[in-house]
Image: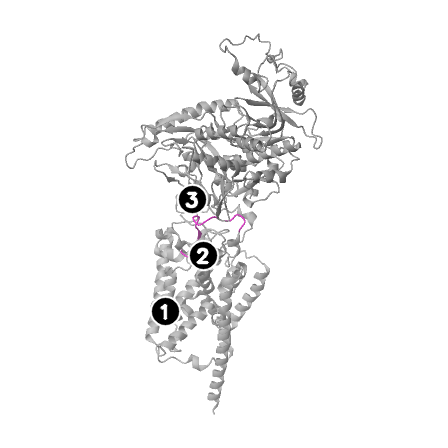
Amino acid sequence: MNQSTQRKKETESRLRTRLIVRRTVRFASAIAFFFVFFFCSAALVKSVCRLSPLLFLTSFLPNREISSSFEVSLFGIFSTLIILLCVVRRRFFCRYLCPLGTAVDAGIWFQRKICPKRFSRRSLLVRPKLVFLFFALLWTFLFLSAAFNWNIRKLETISPFAYDPLAVVSRLFSYPLKPTAAMILFFICFLASPYFLRFVFCPCGILQDFLNFPYRFIKKLFSKDRVPTVLRKKDERRSRRSFFATLGASALGASLFTVAVNFSSKLTHSFFRPLGARSEDDFLVLCARCGRCAAVCPSNILIPINATPTKKELSISSAFFVGQTPTIDFNKGFCEPECVACSQVCPTGALTPISIKEKAARPIAIATFELEKCLLYYDRECSICLRECPYEAISKEWSEEAYATVPVIDSERCAGCGRCVAFCPGEPTLDEYGVPIEDDKNASSSRDKALKMVMRQSQNARV
Amino acid sequence: MFFNEVSRRDWFKSVGLGVGAAALSSIGLSDRESKADFVSQKDKTTGKLLDGSQATPCTLQADGTIVRPSVSLPKISETDVLVVGAGPAGCCAAIAAARLGVKVTLVERYGHFGGLATGGLVLHILGHWTKQDGKSVQVVQGIGEEMMQRLEKTPNGIINRQFAKNPTLDAEAYKYLLVEMITEANIEVLLHSWCCDAIMADSPDPATGNPTVRGAVIQTKLGPQAIIAKQVVDTTGDGDVFYAAGAAHTQREYNIGLVSRIGNLDRINPPKDTKAPRHLGDAEPVKGVRWVNMQGPSLDGCDVRVLSQLELQHRKQIWKQVQEVRSTPGYEDVYLMETAPQIGVRITRVIEGVETLTLENAKAGKKYDDCVAIGGAWNGDHIGWQIPYRALLPKNVENIITAGRSLSAEPLMSDVVRVYPNCWASGHAAGVAAAVAAKSDVTARAVDISEVRRNLLAQKAYLG
C-alpha cells in the first residue's frame, strides 16, 4: 500500500468516527432542546435560548441588562464554551447543537436518499458566494447598528436576532402554530434548498464563520498539511438545478429585504408591548421573536401581531418583519398585577427584567372610557371597574351634564393592565324596547366595551 | 346650655329612669291596650279639648342657644327584640326573631314595609347567587328565598326568577307580601315612627365596660315615646340608633338618586331604526311599566339640606327625561307613573364593627368562624363572601346589632353589600342573633354563635 492510500483511509476512518460522534451529539441535543422547550421552566428555556452564540452576543451589546442569576451564570459558562469551540471548530454550533441545523441536515440527507444524483454530497458544498456575502454584510451591518444604536429608521424592523435558529425553534413552541407568511417562506426555502438556510442565510451560521475565520486563517498560514484534499477538490458535476434553486431562494430573500427596507418606514401602527419593553425602535431590533414572553404569560394575552386584527392594516413587508413580535390582546384577558414573568424570560434583552414594584411605574397601556357604552349611562348600577382595578386608578365622578356617574381614570395610577376592560360588562344587549338589558352572561370579548385600552402618548414611538 | 352642663349620656339615663313616671295621662295613648279605647270613642268629631299643658317645648335662651328640657318620656312598648327600620333587612330580622318565639317590635318611619325595595322603587334583586368553582350557587336563602317564592305565587309579583338570573319584583306586591308575613309572625308594628334617640342603661356593661343600649325613642305625632327592649336591631340603613347610642362609625357620601316608574310602554310603536331614548329603565312584573333608576351625585345622605335640594333637582330631571322619551317618535303615550316616595340614599353611616368586610378578603374567599350570612356580587366574577357576626356588632356599644347596608365594610365593599339580598341575609342573621341573646338573657356580644348558626340553618339560611 502506498502512503497516500494509507493516509486517505486514515482520514476516512477519522471522518467516520467524527460523523458518528456528531450524529450522536446532535441527536441527543435535539432531544434535549425538545425536552427543555416543552417541559422546562421559563428561566431555563431563556438560558437555553442563550446557548445560541448569536443570542448570547446580545448580552454584550451596550446597556443590555441581563440578570445574573445562578442559572444564567452557569449557562453563561456553557455559552462561552460554545463560542470558544466555534472559534476553533468550523460551525461548531450548527454541526453539533443547533436543532434547526439537525433538521436541515436531516432534510439534506433525505433529499440525497430520494435523488442521489441531483443532490450529491459534493454539489451541496456549492456556495453562491455573492449571495452569502450579501447576507454576511447585511447581518453584520444590522448587528452593528443594534450594538451602537444607529437607529436607521428604515432598517429597524429587521432584527438579526429574529432569524437566530434557536429563536425560530423556540417560536414553534411558544406561539400557537399558525402558518404565517414567514414560516411558509422558510419552508419553501427549505424545500428548494436546505443548503440556503444552513450556509447562506442563517445569521448565527455567518457569525460562526466570522468567529472561526481567524483560526482557519492562522492555521492555513502555519500548516503545510492542508485540509483533506477530498473536500477541497473542485467539484466536476455541479448540480445546476441545486445551484439555481439556491440562487432563486437567495434572490427571493434578498428582494424581500429590499421591499422591507423600502416599506418598513411606512409602519404607522404602534403596538402594545410586554412588560419592560424598550423603546419601540430598540425593541424591534432586539426582539428575537422567540415568543418566550408569550409562552410564560399566565393570562395568555401575548400574541404575535399577525394573530391580531391589526394585521390586515399592515403592509405585507411590515407583517413579515414585525408580525412575529409579541403584542398584548386585551380582549383575551388582562395582565396579572403580581406577575412580571414576560420581562424576566427575554433572552435578548428586548424586554428589561423588572420587579413587581417597578411594574406600576412602567405602564403598558392606559384605559380610556366611553360614556355611551357604559351601563351607568343607562341608569344601571355598576361599579365593577372600580372594584376590579388593582391599582385603585378608577373613581366615580358625577356629571351634571350627562346626569350620570362617570368612571374617571387616573392616568398616573393606571398601569394599563386591562383588568377593567376584561370585567367591563360592555355595551349592553338590547331588549324589545331597544333598551339595554343588564345581563352579563352575554358579555363577550367581542362586545364593545365602555373601557378600552389604548397606547400611552409617551409610548408611541412610531407615528 | 343644657347640653353643655349635662352630658348626653346622663340625659339618656334620666330619660330612661323617668319612663313611666310622668306625662302619661295627658298624652292618652300610653300603651298598646289603649288602642281599643281609641276605636270605641263614640263621638270622634267632637274630639278632646286639651289645654296645652302636655307641651314640653325647647327654649331659645338669651345667648342664642336652644335647649331641650329634661323631661320623662312615655313608654309606648316593652319588648324583647326591637327592630328599627322595616326595610328588607329589618323585615327579615323581625320575622326571624318572631319565629323564635320572642316578642318583637318593628318600627318604621313610613306607612309601609320594604324601605328602598318598595318606597325607593329599587326593584332589582341583585346578588343573591354567586359562582363557586364555575357553578352558580344561591347564597341568599332563608327568609329572603321564602319572600321570593311567595312573590312568585303573587300575581305580578316577580319576574326573571330563573336560576342564576337577577329577578325584579313589583313594589306594591312586595308591600302586600310583607304586610302578610309580618302579620303572620305576630309582630308588634309601629309605623310612622322615626327613631330619634337611643335609650341607654344607667350603668355600663360589667363585662366590657361599654355603654349598653336598652331601647329607642321614637318620634311620633304625639311627641317622643320610648320603647324598652332587651336587644335592639338597627336596620335603619342610616344607623340612626347606633348613631344616637354613640357607636363608632364612618359617615360616607355616596350617590343619591330618585327612582321613578313610567307606564304605557306596551303601547309604544316606534318606526323602524328609531334609536330608543336613553332613560327607559328596566322591566318590572307589571306589563307596560318600567322602573327607571338614577345614580345621582355623591353627597351626604344624612344632611337634610342635601336631601331637600336633591329632591327638587331630581324631580325636575325626571320630568325632563320623560318628556325626552315622549318626544321620541312612537313613544308619545309613555307617561310618568310615579316618582319614588323615598329618595334613593345608598350609603351613609357604616358601623365600625369588630370585624370589617374588605374587598381583598372577599376576593380571597376568607372564611370566618362566626359566619352568619353569605352575600354575593351581582356582576363580574359573581364572587361571594361570608358575613361574620362581628361585622354586625359595634366596637364600643352593647346590645345593638346592625344589619343591611350599615354593616361594617370598607367603601368598595359597602357598594356591594348594600344591595338587598345581602340585606335579607344579614337582617336574617341579626334577627336570629338578637332573639337568641334575648332568650338567653346575655348581651349581643356574648351570644352563643353556634346556637345562632343552628337556628339560622333551621330557618333554611345558607351558610356555605
Image mark 2: chain = A
Q: Residue furthest bottom?
A: A1
Q: Give the mark nearer the N terminus: 2 vs 3.
A: 2
Of the residues shown, which amino acid type is indicated by label 1?
Answer: Leu
Quick check: is A333 in the magenta stretch? yes
> Magenta residues, as a range?
A323-339
Labelled disc at residue B427: none
Q: Which residue is under mark 2?
A: A285
SS for dot 2: helix
Of pointers 3 and 1, the one earlier in the residue sequence: 1
Q: Is residue B206 above or below residue A28?
A: above
Cα–Cα gap, marks 1 and 2: 28 Å
Provide the residue designation for mark 3.
Answer: A441
The answer to whether marks 3 and 1 mark residues whose Cβ atoms lie closer than 8 Å is no
Q: Residue at x 65, y 33 (%)?
A: B440
Say which amino acid is labelled 3.
Lys
**Of A24 and A350, which appears nearest the observer?**
A24
Label 1: chain?
A
Question: Crowding near pointer 1: few (<14 within 10 Å), some, many (20+)?
Answer: some
Q: Is residue A56 visible?
A: no
Protein chain holding label 3: A
Percent x, y of residue A184: 37, 63
Relative to A1, B227 lies left or right: right
User: Horizontal and vertical percent for residue A33?
Assistant: 50, 66
CA gap between label 3 and label 1 equals 49 Å
Q: Residue A205, image x and y in percent?
A: 45, 68
